Amino acid sequence: MNLIGHFVDGKRISGGSQRRGDVFDPATGRRTGQVELASGGDVAMVVESAERAARSWRDTSLSRRTAVLFAFRELVHARRDRLAEVITAEHGKVLADAAGEVQRGLEVIEYACGIPSALRGGFSENVSTEVDSYSLRQPLGVVAVISPFNFPVMVPLWFVPVAVACGNAVVLKPSEKDPSAALLLAEWFAEAGLPAGVLNVVNGDKEAVDALLEHPAVKAVSFVGSTPVARYVHQRGAMAGKRVQALGGAKNHMVVLPDADLDLAADAAVNAGFGSAGERCMAISALVAVEPVADELVAKIAQRMAGLRTGDGRRGCDMGPLVTAAHAERVRSYVASGVAAGAVPVVDGRDVEPDGEAGGFWLGPTLFDRVTPDMAIYTDEIFGPVLGVVRVGSYDEAVELVNANPYGNGTAIFTNDGGAARRYQHEVEVGMVGINVPIPVPMAYYSFGGWKSSLFGDLHAHGEDGVRFYTRGKVVTSRWLDPRHGGVNLGFPTQT
């Protein structure tokens, strides 16, 4: 049985944790390993290692930091297939999807390689007579990253390269459901020349999370997960005096106007609704059809779904299993509740015949029509391959529906009317908007994050917000004295 430990002070360690959790291959249902779950004492030891490393890393030149990041980028790029295989083995998403996840993570590494430009300050000469002022951005020290199961590579790479490039030491706590990819990233960072202790990986559950939130040496916490946990992390971390960015859940709407190309909209709905088995915070789970297009659009989506293969992600299938047996059962219960509530099950994923072993955590793509806003399949974040179609009579009704939702992560509108698209991007109360783009995840040099109950904290992930989150601003005002400035004057200094 494979025992998955931690990565501390530049090397893997295992055998010290008293508690363990099981790791499964979702496509077979078989247990493939056990992950050690850190105690509060284990976390304190890891943070101590990071503290030691942070003292010297913050004084390391930008040129040296950049060289490490470039070397790390080359290692990840050369071994991207290996990372994709690990993702598929523990998460279940198909290999092509896993490879796409690695690519999006690489984009953030590449952004972090430009950190000397991102950390440039400002300078003003003679703000007062022979007095100059300039601004600096300096690292925080030790920061924590708590990442979810659905993107075991991309989400850590949203945060870790930027935090390290800014001069911080990082303690990464990946999901205990698929922890192996994070350990590989830490090993490759070390191989690229990152000093021991600058990046540590501690595996664990809520006990480890609470220990990170309470430890006084941890100055900031980045989190991605469900809204209830994001709210908890933000409140607990803020009470402990930490800077927190906690990205929560979503209920992403895709609005289709009557003038839209319905073939392209149907393609997009299938891709965004069922990619990664719907286990994406940016997945489209609510399709808002502005009449009279609903009948035709639902038929086109169902036609495309008929050609999808659900099965083992290593067999060239279109969609893989869900991550755990418990999660698969939870999503199945939502399908049952949708039927009971009166939604029309156009395609019922519970009937799927997967291309995979019987023990896998299977549920096929599911399509509901005539969903209403009072149904649980509409109100709740299901986090599975369930797409619900809500019919509305007008653009205004569609916008009102989207804005009434408590989440504000991502949304999309499909239309050939530029005026309607521009109006939508202005009026919709959502942090990331796609125009004829179903999953509007920003490039790394922009920042990722939602509004309302999809984000707790002020700064988003990566891009300029990421640099600001992992640094503190400092302004220096200086005067180099010469004999002309002598004498005593007790008056209040003025800007003259």
Image (cartoon, rainbow, N blue to C red):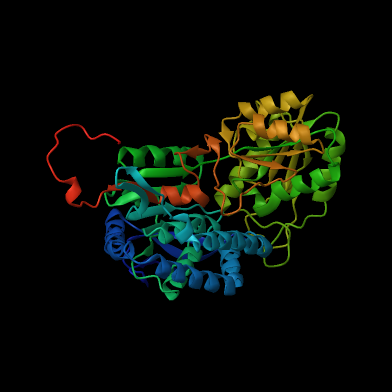
Number of numbered callouts drawn = 0
State the quadrant of the C terminus: top left
Q: In this view, does 398 lie above or below 447?
A: above
Query: Which residue appears at 36% of the width and 58% of the height?
Result: 168
Q: In this view, does 132 lie above or below 488?
A: below
- Which image quadrant is residue 202 in? bottom left
x and y percentages locating residue 167 in the rendered image? 37, 60
x and y percentages locating residue 189 in the rendered image? 44, 70
x and y percentages locating residue 36 in the rendered image? 39, 62
Along the viewing direction, whichever of 31 and 494 lies nearer the viewer:
494
Along the viewing direction, whichever of 415 and 381 lies nearer the viewer:
415
Q: Is residue 344 visible?
A: no
Along the viewing direction, whichever of 479 and 318 lies nearer the viewer:
479
The reply, left or right, for residue 391 in relation to residue 399 is right
The reply, left or right, for residue 368 in relation to residue 84 is right
x and y percentages locating residue 439 in the rendered image? 67, 47
